Amino acid sequence: MSVMTAIADAPLTCQGLGLCLGGRDVLQGIDLSVLPGETLGVVGPNGSGKSTLLKLLAGLRTPSSGSVRLLGEALERMPRRHVAQRLALVEQQADTLDAISVYDAVALGRTPWLSALAPFGNDDRAIVEQALADADASHLRRRLWGELSGGERQRVHIARALAQRPQVLLLDEPTNHLDIQHQLGLLRQVQALPVTTLVALHDLNQALTCDRLAVLDQGRLVALGKPEAVLTPERLLGTFGVRGHYLVDPYDGARVLRFRA
Amino acid sequence: MSRLLPISLFALLALCLAMLAGIAIGETRVGAEAIWQVLANQLWQAGHAVDPIDAGIVWNYRLPRTLVAAACGAGLATCGVILQALLRNPLAEPYLLGLSAGASTGAVAVGLFGLGGAVLSLSAGAFIGALAAFALVLLLSRASGSRHDNAQVILAGIAGSQLFNALTAFLITKSATAEQARGILFWLLGNLSGVRWPSVWLAVPVALFGLAICLWQRRALDAFTFGADSAASLGVPVRRTQLLLISCAALVTAVMVSIVGAIGFVGLVIPHALRLLLGPGHSRLLPASALGGALFLIVADILSRTLITGQVIPVGVVTALIGAPVFALILISRRGRP
């Protein structure tokens, strides 16, 4: 498949995307295509616009310039329900004071598929069970939200997004609250799912496992490509302000990044 | 789902029993049999021989009064559920957010000046007042910073309530006769005494309409559990839903206030208690809150007629005596949480 047809089939694309808040360009001129089935990582220092980009791509904020296309349709002309049937977003730190059970929180993911009169059916229950299993949260189903740890909450959010049965999944720093086992497991699980994924990541070594990486710096897209081609020592110094070089792990031959201040 | 029928029947039975008590208890006690005969005579000309005084008390006074109490309680509790879900604030309630105060001002303005002439009814005036108060409270809480802060919205609500109560007092002092002023002040405290059949035909449909709208939107209300952004990413058109449901809450509050005055805390106590029992899901919480609110206000009305012999306490005083301690309990139980 040539690059041009791949872009034409891209489930999620944006062109010239920008957001201006209070006279400041939070995001500017972003051109991006997420290819079918790939896991595209978005990295950048704090405040580089990663979360904002995800919100614009999910249609939660209206861009000041540019446009987003989801599965070939212009996002701003799609009803919210149609967007939610195709795209799911896992935000950072979505919290509640309600004593909602894990099962019910994940069942919220069926909202875009249920009309006012439709009952919550067996199909919906099966999808919720599958989502719980995929996010390794089945054993939590009866627990209440207030009793969960940060990492468990994150997995419930991911399960809810999976219960939407999206074709495109947006994850905003999903591994933030997770312990090391779940950090490693989660990205692998997400990459194994038959969905196109765009994931904002903080940990650059985790980012190396993505199919491609987009690097944001002060609201601009400064690099896009294979992880090792993008995260060069020059880029690490210029964008992230750290010296870094690659080491080869003698255990499995994988290349890992090592940083110095 | 299989439990829906027995639960509904039980709920209906509880409501009927409460209404029976509401009709029977008062300065003059009326027996259950006499009540049944009066209702049978009125509804299908059964032709029982009944005391005409009993008949008058049951049919013209206590039955409409109890029906309106039930409708108001159900309506106000439903409003509480809506506001708590949309503002994600367990303390949100029409009275505390100033909706009731705004509605009072609107109703008094229309009542005293005939503002808007025949076009604008008391309820319409109250509706405009309630919307104005809510807009003010939202603007104030946004201007003061974080709109997700529990305390901020309630503080804004207090400011709004005070302002609109002052406006109401100003209007009364400026324009009402002494006789009018006494009547209005008694009504403002929440009062079911003057309720007759025409009020029933307004209160009951509005309460049912409000409940129906909310049940239709129950999944959207559930989707607000993790905030407005989360609701939007679950496919809820957030702005449109907020506008619809808040207008609905303002309308229901306004109609209830225009009939019985500002009755506080029903929308706080009932949803809060039922959320502890049933959990936060709106498909159960909404009908349960409507029923609980109806029962609560019927009982509060009975208490208001019987606590002091020969005197009627405004029903708003009774609900506040119960509601204010509950408000305090919620405050204490949320200590240390954001």
Image (cartoon, rainbow, N blue to C red):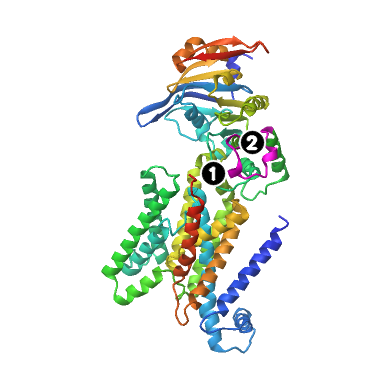
- In the depicted structure, whether residue B316 falls above or below residue A180: below
Residue A159: which numbered mark, if any?
A: 2
What's the chain of the residue with tag 1?
A
The earlier-in-sequence mark between 1 and 2 is 1
What's the chain of the residue with tag 2?
A
- In the depicted structure, whether residue B337 falls above or below residue B133: above
Taking the magenta stretch, the answer to whether it contains residue A150 is yes
Is label 1 or label 2 in front?
1
The residue range painted magenta reads A134-152
Tell if the residue under mark 1 belongs to the same chain as the one under mark 2.
yes
> Which x, y percent locates residue A168?
60, 29
Amino acid identity at mark 1: Thr
Residue B120: which numbered mark, if any?
A: none
Amino acid identity at mark 2: Ala
Q: Judge by depth and name the residue closer to the eye, A71 or B287.
A: B287
Taking the magenta stretch, the answer to whether it contains residue B146 is no
- In the depicted structure, whether residue B32 falls above or below residue A256: below
| Label 2 crowd bin: few (<14), some (14–19), many (20+), radius 10 Å | many
Image mark count: 2
Distance from the alpha carbon under mark 1 to that under mark 2:
16 Å
